[in-house]
């Protein structure tokens, strides 16, 4: 079976860790791309909910899927964010979404602010 590649937003990681049925297929049949910034958010969330040991575990588990952000990606993400100011999109989400667009892979999230954007795989 060929795995489909997705950019995992922090929301997707959290749902997979929680065992959400709606994200089950992505935990088994997806190739993950993310950044250290999404892992930073995941680490903080897990640290607060489950403690340092679990936070360290998931950070280490997903870290090999992390890719570096290029300067042009950062600039384009901030242009995107400025174009959608009224939505109050986070810096980290805008960076992830822009990277997903650049790589031509779906942005996997359940964040309602991204639901109707192109190139989003919205799963609640």
Image (cartoon, rainbow, N blue to C red):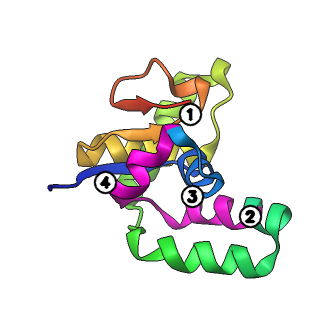
| Residue that mark 4 sits on | 29
| Residue that mark 3 sits on | 38
Q: Secondary structure at mark 2?
A: helix
Residue occupying image coordinates x 35% and y 24%: 118
CA separation in Å, label 4 and label 3: 20 Å
Q: Secondary structure at mark 1?
A: loop
CA separation in Å, label 1 and label 3: 14 Å
Q: Earlier in the sequence, mark 4 or mark 2?
A: 4
The reply to whether dot 1 and dot 4 touch (C-beta < 8 Å) is: no
Residue 95 falls inside the magenta stretch: no
Q: Nearer the viewer, mark 1 or mark 3?
A: 1
Residue occupying image coordinates x 44% and y 59%: 34
Q: Which residues are magenta?
A: 22-44
Q: Is residue 77 visible?
A: no
The reply to whether dot 4 and dot 3 touch (C-beta < 8 Å) is: no
Quadrant that contains the N terminus: bottom left
CA separation in Å, label 1 and label 2: 18 Å
User: Is 97 or 75 nearer to us in this picture?
Assistant: 97
- Mark 3, other Cα within 10 Å: few <14 / some 14–19 / many ≥20: many
What percent of the width, then of the height, locates residue 48? 84, 63
Query: Can you tell which mark lies on residue 46?
Result: 2
Query: Can you tell which mark lies on residue 110?
Result: 1
Q: Earlier in the sequence, mark 4 or mark 3?
A: 4
The reply to whether dot 3 and dot 2 touch (C-beta < 8 Å) is: no
Q: Earlier in the sequence, mark 1 or mark 4?
A: 4
CA separation in Å, label 3 and label 2: 12 Å
């Amino acid at each position: 079976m060929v795995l489909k590649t997705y950019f995992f937003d922090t929301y997707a990681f959290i749902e997979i860790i929680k065992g959400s049925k709606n994200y089950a297929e992505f935990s088994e049949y997806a190739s993950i791309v993310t950044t250290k910034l999404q892992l930073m958010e995941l680490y903080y969330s897990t640290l607060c909910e489950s403690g340092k040991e679990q936070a360290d575990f998931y950070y280490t588990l997903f870290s090999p899927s992390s890719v570096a952000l290029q300067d042009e990606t950062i600039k384009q993400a901030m242009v995107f964010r400025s174009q959608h100011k009224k939505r109050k999109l986070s810096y980290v989400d805008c960076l992830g979404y822009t990277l997903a667009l650049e790589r031509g892979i779906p942005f996997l999230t359940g964040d309602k602010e991204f639901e109707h954007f192109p190139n989003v795989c919205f799963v609640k």
